Image (cartoon, coloured by chain):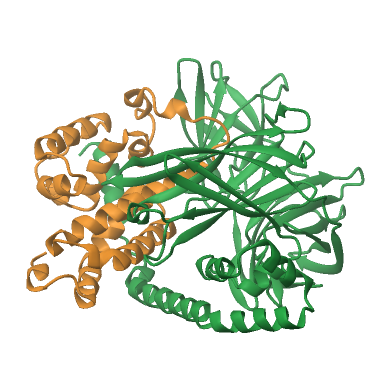
Chain colours: A orange, B green
Amino acid sequence: MNWLNQEKGFSKEAFITLVEQERERLYRVAYGYLKNESLALEALDEAIYLFYKERKKLREPAYALTYVTRILINECLRIIRQQKKLVYEGPEHFQEGVEDAVVSISTKVALETLPEHHRQVIVLRYFAELTIKETASILDTPEGTIASWTKQALKLLKLELSDEKGARIL
Amino acid sequence: MNTRKQQFLEDLAEAKDYPKELYLSLDRLDKRLKHEKRQKRLLYGGLPAFAVSFLFILLLNTNITFARALYEVPFLSRIAESVIYNTSLKSAIENEHIQYVNLKGLHKDMPLNLPYVISDERNLLLFFEVPKVSDNLAEGSFMIQVESMTDLDSGEKIHHGYTISASGFDFEYEDLESVLSEVLISFVEVAMPRNLGLTVTLNHFGYEGAHRRSLGYYRYAFNLTLQDPKPTKILSMDQEVMLEGQRILFKELTLFPTGSELTYRLPSDNTMDLMLHFTKELDGVSMPLGSSGAMFQDLPDGTHITWLRMQDNYFSPPKTRTLVLESYSMVPKDRAPLTLNLAEGFLEENPYGLRFHSLERHEDGYSFFIETEGTYALPPISFITNDAGEVLHTTSESLRGDHLFGFTLKGSPPKTLSVEVALGPLITLEDPIFIPLPTE
């Protein structure tokens, strides 16, 4: 992200650089949430558009990635809310007894059953390969809390992964 | 490495299978911004022309709708409104179905206006206006919801038999002085009162990170007296389209004040059940269909009729409208139910690309999950029956995009269930089928 330090304000050129450098990471965030290629692209396009329109309001250019990631997460959540309109009757049972629910289903489905803050840390840390510090910045939450949420989420997913460096577990 | 970890790593790897369209995101943004610029230019560039035509009509006194508009609303505010609402003054006033009600609501210093409505026998379109009384309103989004409705003639609340469509909105451009939002109420099963009391809420909200927070919540009451419904116009189509040997007969287009209704028939001699997915082209520009609902009927002779409601552009009617059949799904009419073996965890082999995925037990019931090979717009199973032939009540939901569906039932899972396939995978036409829609 050092490219941002050379910019004064947030110019169109800086915006293009950001998108070109970070689009794969942003796509993985969207895919982590939506599990669908076309929906992930739709969310990313909308987030890029909204970020472009709002970029002049960005007071601190160094937080551009944080800012666009937050927009993207909101967009993903909006799409998920729309998708939930396909639910014909209440799906409340998926919100309850999460630990039991993940036993017999795949990790993808299990991820969707996690409480929102747990899902966020999994997507940001493992799909987007962000560090605890970067994740904490995006979610505006203390690093200790992020570390704790990550452990809890991995436990709920019944995964034994290194908790130190996000997707560098690979 | 345990299986679960392996599965998770595969999921992560799948996210890195980047589609080629990802690398065209800046091109798509560029096109979108250019399109917006064109629209803005059109909007503002047209303003003097509206004023000229308005005065011209005023002087000649030849147009009753203009005269009425001048009489009912202040001239300058209408001009300003036309710009704000992304519509043309001329066409807004010339919409013969507009009823100016000019109702104003105020709660906690937050105004909400209802300047006009369009209604017919069963549908009511409300055009709400949110004035920007504070710069704070430029942040966040808004949602208008109808909290309750009362038939003012009988004094009774209307509890059911209607649907409401509304969408969130915001001050898209900083220089807007107000925004307009449509709410459509369709009285599907009950008659629409002509004297109607509405309680509506305005929710102003924003986000902190991923967390939604309320910026304001307001409540208003409006009493409406609606004009008598105007007669509908029926335009004949009688066009036949063949799709994989199946006939689709587009019969007619009915024009209501609040929208258009397309009637099409699937004749009884078709061998497949079809579900059709449309978009539309207005003056050659492709856009979503804007459907506000559909009704179906199966006649005793096996003919299937669909009435598909579409919202119109009330203020700038296009010169040409074309229905575009983009995709469809089909299943044989004589399909047999499939056996789902819950005890052993498999679904009978089938040509629809449906597979048993998993079974979950809950305290008071169970859920089974069906994975689909192709894309399904809706849950692929309709009726579920047990060994005794009883149809079981189920709730269904789409879980993973459009490839995994969950079905939840009460009680303990039996050894087997019989499931009826509702539709097949979505098939996108390489060459969409264009059906011109008649105009008046």
Is A26 drawn above or below residue B168 in the view shown?
A: below
Is any atom of residue B429 visible in this view?
A: yes
The residue shown at (19%, 55%) is: A66
Is B236 drawn above or below residue B423 in the view shown?
A: below
Quadrant where the N terminus of chain A lies? bottom left
Q: Is residue B60 left or right of residue A88?
A: right
Residue at the right extreme?
Answer: B301
Q: Position of residue B222 (x, y in %)?
A: 62, 41
Is B56 drawn above or below residue A110 in the view shown?
A: below
Total marks placed? 0
Instruction: Please identify the quarter of the rendering in which residue B323 is found.
Output: bottom right
Q: Is residue B1 left or right of residue B296?
A: left
Residue placed most toward the observer, A123 or B430: A123
The residue shown at (73%, 27%) is: B155
Instruction: Please identify the quarter of the rendering in which residue B341 is found.
Output: top right
Q: Is residue B298 left or right of residue B146?
A: right
Is any atom of residue B431 visible in this view?
A: no
Residue placed most toward the observer, A85 or B426: A85
The residue shown at (34%, 42%) is: B212
Residue placed most toward the observer, B232 or B268: B232
Residue placed most toward the observer, B146 or B63: B63
Q: Position of residue A26 (x, y in %)?
A: 27, 59
Is B392 drawn above or below residue B195 in the view shown?
A: above
Q: Position of residue A120 (x, y in %)?
A: 26, 42
Q: Position of residue B386 (x, y in %)?
A: 66, 22
